[in-house]
Image (spheres, rainbow, N blue to C red):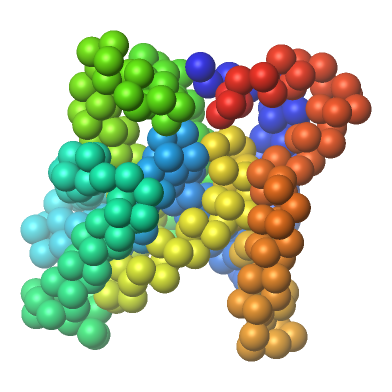
């Protein structure tokens, strides 16, 4: 069963306070970095649901995010739906596509599952790239943000949009927690630990995997729509497999199967990227070295390492009970 510890509540509070401080004190560039972190955090949160708690390592979540961006752009610019309706529609479309992918790939495991999701991602990339209605290599521009002027909010202002993305991340996190605490989430954890045993108990394994993949797709579609609103321009590069690989790196860097860890990983990754890129164009090498060190240390990412050290010192005794059950949070 999914549950929080005192330490995890503390980390969430620190992250939230830091985001609010940045939103109200930073200039334009700082707000842009904050928005980038928040959108990436939503993406890796969705990926952690399937990879960390279900053992389904996906290399198509970047493509799903890109599809969410394109779906939002098409529904708002071409179909003419109001931006908020287009946002909901984009999430529904990506959720449905993710459910289909999850249902098809549910019977594969390990490297075969990874390669199958990669194939779906590359097919989506090729289709978007080669279809004229999506703008091809030129992409699509003129994307609008929701009009919340009726309640006194101008989302064309960077500060307001950053707070909008922060609220979206909070809602995405609460949705992920609700799913993982539900019967569906408990079934997923059972499948992760022993798929054969859960099948012997009469559980329809493929359906559970597909449902979780679909719900993860809803959140991923939300991240894609926010990405389209942020830049107000999209291109096929959003669907490239490297986006999925980068998201997986962030999840592992932060802490797989913790929900809180990927949020920490998103903050660390974006800050490292911007700070190091100002010094060297080879910042990926430094991030790669950090990731290798994290993996070789056998710690579950940055957050997992901190949690293990604090739990060992009994600073937060509630963690001791949780450590006995894998994937508890």
**Which residue is drawn at the image coordinates 65% and 79% (left, top)?**
285
User: On the image, which quarter does residue 193 sit in?
Assistant: top left
Q: Position of residue 198 (x, y in %)?
A: 33, 18
How many numbered callouts?
0
Report whether residue 278 is seen: yes
Residue 84 lies, with reference to residue 184, above or below; the image says below
In this orientation, which residue lies closer to the viewer: 319 or 137? 319
**Which residue is drawn at the image coordinates 32% and 24% (left, top)?**
196
Horizontal side, residue 37 vs residue 112: left or right: right
Q: Could you tell me which quadrant the C terminus lies in?
A: top right
Horizontal side, residue 45 vs residue 206: left or right: right
In this orientation, which residue lies closer to the viewer: 206 or 64? 206
User: On the image, which quarter does residue 150 sit in?
Assistant: top left
**Which residue is drawn at the image coordinates 49% and 39% (left, top)?**
52
Q: Position of residue 200 (x, y in %)?
A: 27, 15
**Which residue is drawn at the image coordinates 62% and 45% (left, top)?**
255
Report whether residue 149 is seen: no
Horizontal side, residue 22 vs residue 179: left or right: right
User: On the image, which quarter does residue 257 sit in?
Assistant: top right
Residue 201 lies, with reference to residue 192, above or below; the image says above
Residue 113 lies, with reference to residue 5, above or below; the image says below
Q: Position of residue 276 (x, y in %)?
A: 71, 78
Q: Position of residue 251 (x, y in %)?
A: 55, 51
In this orientation, which residue lies closer to the viewer: 172 or 167? 172
């Amino acid at each position: 069963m999914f549950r929080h510890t005192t330490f995890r509540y503390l980390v969430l509070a620190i992250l939230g306070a830091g985001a609010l401080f940045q939103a109200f004190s930073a200039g334009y560039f700082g707000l842009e970095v904050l928005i980038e972190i928040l959108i990436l955090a939503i993406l890796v949160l969705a990926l952690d649901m399937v990879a960390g708690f279900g053992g389904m390592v996906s290399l198509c979540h970047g493509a799903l995010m890109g599809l969410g961006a394109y779906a939002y752009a098409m529904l708002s610019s071409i179909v003419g739906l109001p931006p908020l309706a287009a946002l909901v529609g984009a999430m529904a479309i990506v959720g449905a596509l993710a459910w289909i992918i999850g249902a098809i790939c549910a019977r594969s495991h390990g490297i075969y599952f990874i390669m199958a999701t990669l194939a779906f991602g590359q097919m989506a990339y090729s289709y978007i790239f080669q279809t004229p209605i999506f703008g091809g290599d030129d992409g699509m521009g003129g994307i609008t943000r929701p009009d919340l002027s009726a309640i006194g909010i101008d989302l064309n202002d960077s500060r307001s949009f950053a707070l909008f993305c922060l609220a979206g991340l909070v809602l995405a996190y609460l949705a992920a927690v609700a799913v993982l605490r539900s019967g569906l989430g408990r079934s997923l954890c059972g499948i992760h630990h022993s798929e054969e045993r859960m099948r012997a108990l009469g559980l329809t394994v493929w359906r559970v995997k597909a449902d979780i993949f679909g719900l993860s797709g809803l959140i991923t579609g939300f991240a894609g729509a926010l990405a389209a609103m942020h830049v107000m321009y999209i291109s096929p590069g959003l669907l490239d497999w490297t986006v999925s690989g980068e998201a997986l790196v962030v999840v592992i860097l932060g802490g797989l199967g913790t929900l809180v860890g990927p949020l920490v990983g998103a903050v660390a990754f974006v800050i490292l990227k911007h700070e190091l890129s100002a010094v060297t164009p080879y910042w990926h090498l430094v991030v790669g070295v950090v990731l290798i060190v994290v993996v070789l240390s056998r710690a579950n990412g940055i957050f997992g390492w901190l949690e293990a050290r604090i739990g060992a010192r009994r600073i937060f005794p509630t963690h001791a009970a949780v450590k006995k059950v894998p994937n508890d949070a």
